Amino acid sequence: MESESTRAAVEEVLTWVASGCDVLVRGRVASDAAAVLDLLQRWPGTGGVLIRPGGDLPLSALRTHPGAPRRASGPTSVADLASWLRFEVGTTHGLVLVDDPQEVDLDSLRLIASVARRAEARVVAGTGADLLADGGRWCTVLARRAPVEVRVAPLALPDTHLLLERVLGGPVDAEVTADVARWSGGVAQVVELIGRAAWTVGVLAVRDGVRTRVRPWEEVPLGAVAHLLLAEAGADQVATLERVVATDPPPTLAEVEAWAEPGVLDRLDACGLLRPVGPDARLAVDPPALARALVARAGRRRVRPCPAA
């Protein structure tokens, strides 16, 4: 499904590319940015060669590309890969699209940057990670090209409704859509996870042909949301989020700064996992489904049974 936020991000990317800039597309999760790259590749008059991670071996992202040249014996040479990439760039409007660049091997990144520089091509990378905070291979190569950052906006309510109808296989009650939109924070993959979980455990059911809520939302298991949104988070970040959801009333910025490890708050803010709430701008975990998942996780630890004697 091509959401309005995905289309808007593509249009913004193309505006920057036309002005001669590289672009880093940031989504709340990697799939948001990947959707932008996929649509860019299919956008009329645009195209682009799309490079995805291929493993840890040198040049694996390029050698595993479906269009890359193959040798009867042994790996494809650097010269052959460079020649192929130059040809692809020349026939795809001068665009190289890199999905999850932090997972792409360093040699592939270096060759992409070299070919793009010589061909005067633009590089558009997409990720759900805070690459500047993570450092590593991205900063070593592609960040030096000074990309402009384009953020993928949350799903609008109509797109949330259409996505739920696709996931649940039929018409969805407007109240269900509004609730899921609020819980998900407009993250498409979180919308899907909530919808499937609610349907599986019987919180949603068909009434008069419409998928509607028949039991409390509190019965929906949200562990998958935590796994999705915290897949790249360190233990210190998870611990900070757990303390935030356990604090009542919600903590102030000064209170969190007092007990969070140095740099953790900045990284959580960069990933959009904290938001201000109330007139005095206290902090809450975002999206709300993640907060619920963390509360449930803490509750399971507290009631964990003692081992049998």
Image (cartoon, rainbow, N blue to C red):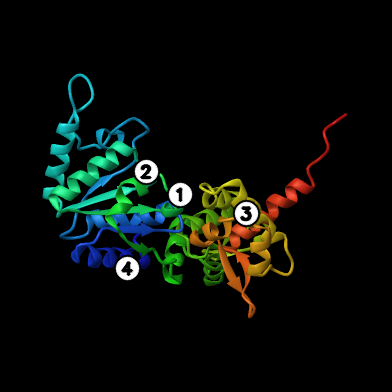
Q: Are marks 4 and 2 in contact (CB under 8 Å)?
A: no
Q: Which residue is mark 4?
A: 8
- Total numbered badges shown on the rendered structure: 4
Q: Which mark is residue 261?
A: 3
Residue at x-position 32% and y-position 43%: 52
At label 2, the amino acid type is: Arg
Query: Dot 1: what SS?
Result: helix
Q: Which residue is mark 2?
A: 137
How far apart are the alpha carbons under marks 2 and 1? Answer: 9 Å
Side of 108 where 286 appears, left or right: right
Q: Quadrant of residue 17?
A: bottom left
Q: Which mark is residue 134?
A: 1
Q: Position of residue 287 (x, y in %)?
A: 56, 63
How far apart are the alpha carbons under marks 4 and 2? Answer: 29 Å
Q: Between tags 4 and 2, which lies in front?
A: 2
**Where 285 falls versus 126 (above or below)?**
below
User: Mark 1 or mark 4: which comes first in sequence?
Assistant: 4
How far apart are the alpha carbons under marks 1 and 4? Answer: 27 Å
Q: Between tags 1 and 4, which lies in front?
A: 1
At label 3, the amino acid type is: Glu
At label 1, the amino acid type is: Asp
Q: Quadrant of residue 46?
A: bottom left
Q: Is residue 101 visible?
A: no
Mark 3 is surrounded, within 10 Å at the Cα level, by few (under 14), some (14 to 19) or many (20 or more) other residues, namely few
How far apart are the alpha carbons under marks 4 and 3? Answer: 36 Å
How far apart are the alpha carbons under marks 1 and 3? Answer: 16 Å
Q: In front here: 114 or 91? A: 114
